[in-house]
Image (cartoon, helix red, strand yellow):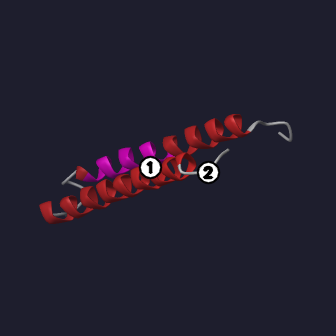
Amino acid sequence: MGTESKRDKFVRLAENRTQGVLKGIELLGNLVNSNAYDYSKKDLDKIIAAIKEATVDLENTYAKAISKEQKKFKL
């Protein structure tokens, strides 16, 4: 993979990491089986809030990177 372009590397890693996140969310969804697990609405709300916060943080990280690129001085 020494000749892998930056774009190809980004796509490869983004697809793998996104798939991992989606699988993790799917696995969290499996925890709603009340016959196997004991949880409260407060527990679920905390999980969902944490995921939403992480998503907002990710959006802010990308927005800052884009903003930083646009602010570069060029002649």
| Closer to the camera in the image, 37 or 14 | 14
Mark 1: amino acid: Ala
In front of the other: 12 or 22: 12
Residue depicted at 37% across the width and 52% down the height: 55
- Pick whichever, 63 or 9, lies toward us: 63
> Which residue bears the numbered disc 1?
63
In the rendered image, residue 66, in percent from the top left (x then y), is placed at 51, 47
Coordinates of residue 8 in the picture (x, y in percent): 70, 34
Magenta segment, prevailing SS (helix, strand or loop): helix
Label 2 sits on residue: 73
**Local SS, label 2:** loop
Q: Is residue 23 located in the magenta-colored stretch of the structure?
A: yes
The C terminus, quarter of image? top right
Residue 51 lies in quadrant: bottom left
Q: Residue at x 68, y 35 (%)?
A: 7
> At which x and y percent is residue 65?
52, 52
Locate residue 9, reporting x and y percent: 70, 40
Range drawn in magenta: 20-31
